Image (cartoon, rainbow, N blue to C red):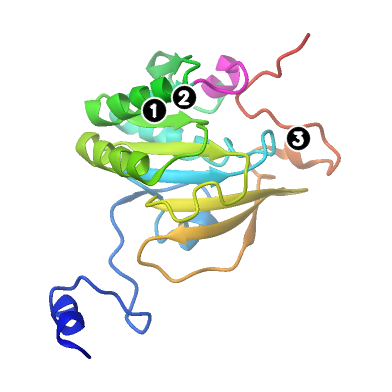
Amino acid sequence: MNTLLASLHKKRLVWSAKQAPLMQPPSLATGFTELDDALSGGWPESGVVSINSLSGIGELRLLLPALALRNTQNKRLMIIITPPYPVNAEFLHEQGIDLTDVLIVNVNAHQSQLWCAEQCLKSGCCACVLMWPEKLQHHQVKRFQLAAQQGCSVLFTFHAQQHATAGLPVSLALSLEPASEGIKVNITKRIGSWPVPPFTLSYQSRWPKLTQSANATPDYHGFKEQLG
């Protein structure tokens, strides 16, 4: 081992595959036992979580149990930035989320969305931020990470394109696919952990009507489809 590499090892700045996974940061239970096990406890308490998924396959339902729990615990705001469909307030209320703690921000310009997300994350007033941004860049994600750490908040970004955040410094990245009984999850990135094979989460116990037919219409999971 050369001198530079030895020095980095001594300072614990290099991690080798033969080592045990790094100690995981504080987490929030997802509400799904199998997902909690795969994530060593749950969603990160702060940071950036990237979700690559088609729209309407149950991707937001994956977050709802944790969002409801976090809302109950600390009563901070849940910010939804420029959602792709109108928000179904009745559905969120049924899932245990206090609507007085939900703030929807509609801004069209991409840079304005990024600015809004960063300000909300670092404010300390927001438990989480949800957004559907265009392609993100490395420096933008770094700013989000710092803001999330400052405000003890978490940013969930949704992307329709596969590998939209590949190579970016996100805390966690998931790729989702529809499944007749729920949703198929592939954890594509998680800092300091061993990889796990893709698995399917069942939604049957929480939303039995949703999983009765594999040919069901798209699930807008908290949004109402825009008609007309």
Label whose residue precedes the other's in the sequence (2 or 3): 2
Q: Residue at x 53, y 58 (%)?
A: 187
Q: Which residue is mark 1?
A: 114
Callouts 2 and 1 close, C-beta under 8 Å: yes
Magenta range: 82-93
Q: Position of residue 139 (x, y in %)?
A: 33, 43
How far, Cα to Cα, is label 2 from label 3? 36 Å
Quick one: 44 or 10, which is closer to the camera?
A: 10
Please tell me whether residue 31 is drawn above or below residue 150 in the rendered image: below
Residue shown at the point (22%, 91%) measured from the top left: 1
Above or below 170: residue 110: above
In the image: residue 200, left or right of residue 171: right
Q: Which residue is mark 3?
A: 209
The image position of residue 15, as x and y in percent, is 29, 75
**Left or right: residue 113 compared with residue 210:** left
Amino acid type assigned to the residue bearing label 3 in the image:
Lys
Dot 3 or dot 1: first in sequence order is 1
- Report whether 15 appears left or right of 52: left
Which label is found at residue 110?
2
